[in-house]
Image (cartoon, grey):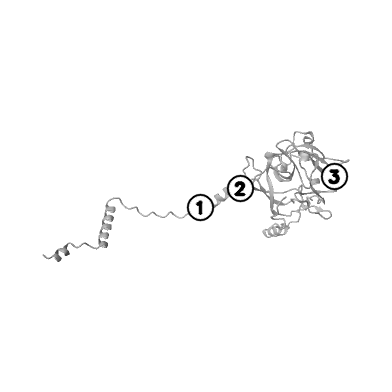
């Protein structure tokens, strides 16, 4: 037999063919040994109702967290802070800035300062002094004036340890006159219960030209006629000297002659303070008469007509 015949008999197969056999054997071995994993079935898609429910739960949790620790919405029903805050203003309150506990340098937290506008739970008539216990200025029996349930908005005047003295229309802190920008203004007439609008909810009418306040100061409004009503025989009910205890604050309204505040019912406990008023997110003028027929169209008309668009989004300071 020739050398060519012997070489033809033992010729090696091409590399590709050999590799194919190796892969074939490997595949056969896999099939005979451990079975290959079956392809996973895709998870069934969530129903539209379930997706809406999950979104609603997440939104509710985030809103609850925000309202508990960060911000809170409140409405101003009285005129004790006019014209700084008007009746019908809806405010967002920063609850985080005065949060109790240790102060961390990278968080926007600080102590309460003089001049801050705070929102707090009305604590009721202070029982530690005769002038507050026997005062008839504040009726705690009213359902809209329940202690530790009704929200009040006032400006911080006295800090813990301060001696606050009110003499007629002037305020002194530790013997020094308080730096306030005073403007004379006229309160609106009282509300007529026989009409649907709130006539007493109109802003104060400023008498004369109002000069801008100095840097760092705020505006206080004094009503000469209202002041005469508060005073009797030269002595005003709100006059006196007040020593602010530790853990308490002395608060007054900017509408100084139409405000029931710490002069009449006492001091504000630190634990009753909710936060600092930030800005007006919506303002509705309740002094304008509403539409006669309560229909959805009239509600929409009243919304656009009675909304104080210029106050919406303004900062409170």
Residue at position x 27%, y 59% from top? Answer: 19
**Circle 3 or circle 2, nearest the eye:** 2
Residue at the extreme left of the image, as rendered = 1
Q: CA distance from mark 3 to mark 2?
A: 44 Å
Horizontal relation, residue 12 to residue 65: left or right = left
Q: Which mark is residue 229?
A: 3
Q: In x, y percent, where is residue 215?
A: 76, 51
Residue underneath mark 2: 66
Looking at the rendering, in which quadrant would you find the N terminus?
bottom left
Q: In x, y percent, where is residue 41?
A: 39, 54
Circle 3 residues within 10 Å: few <14, some 14–19, many ≥20: few
Going from the N terminus, do you reach mark 3 or mark 1 first? 1
Work out whether 166 lies above or below 200.
Answer: above
Asked if marks 3 and 1 touch (Cβ < 8 Å), the reply is no
Residue at the extreme right of the image, as rendered = 233
Work out whether 126 lies above or below 41.
Answer: above
Going from the N terminus, do you reach mark 3 or mark 2 first? 2
Res. 279 in view? yes
Q: Secondary structure at mark 3?
A: helix
């Amino acid at each position: 037999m020739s050398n060519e015949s012997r070489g033809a008999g033992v010729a090696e197969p091409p590399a590709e063919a050999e590799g194919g056999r190796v892969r074939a054997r490997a595949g056969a071995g896999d099939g005979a040994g451990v079975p290959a994993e079956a392809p996973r079935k895709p998870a069934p898609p969530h129903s539209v109702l379930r997706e809406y429910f999950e979104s609603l739960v997440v939104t509710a949790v985030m809103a609850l967290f925000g309202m508990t620790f960060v911000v809170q919405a409140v409405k101003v029903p009285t005129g004790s802070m006019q014209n700084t805050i008007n009746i019908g203003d809806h405010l967002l309150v920063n609850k985080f800035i005065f949060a109790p506990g240790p102060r961390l340098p990278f968080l926007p937290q600080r102590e309460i300062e003089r001049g801050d506008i705070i929102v707090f739970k009305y604590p009721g008539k202070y029982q530690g002094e005769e002038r507050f216990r026997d005062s008839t200025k504040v009726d705690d029996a009213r359902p809209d004036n329940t202690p530790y349930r009704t929200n009040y908005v006032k400006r911080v005047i006295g800090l813990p340890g301060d001696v606050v003295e009110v003499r007629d229309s002037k305020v002194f802190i530790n013997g020094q006159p308080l730096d306030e920008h005073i403007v004379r203004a006229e309160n609106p007439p009282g509300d007529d219960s026989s009409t649907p609008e709130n006539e007493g909810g109109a802003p104060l009418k400023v008498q004369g030209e109002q000069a801008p306040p100095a840097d760092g100061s705020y505006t206080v409004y004094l009503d000469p006629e209202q002041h005469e009503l508060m005073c009797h025989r030269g002595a005003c009910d709100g006059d006196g000297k007040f020593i602010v205890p530790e853990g308490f604050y002395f608060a007054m309204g900017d509408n100084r002659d139409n405000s029931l505040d710490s002069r009449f019912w006492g001091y504000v406990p630190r634990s009753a303070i909710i936060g600092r008023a930030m800005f007006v997110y919506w303002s509705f003028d309740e002094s304008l008469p509403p539409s006669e027929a309560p229909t959805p169209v009239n509600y929409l008309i009243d919304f656009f007509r009675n909304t104080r668009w210029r106050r919406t989004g303004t900062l409170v300071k």
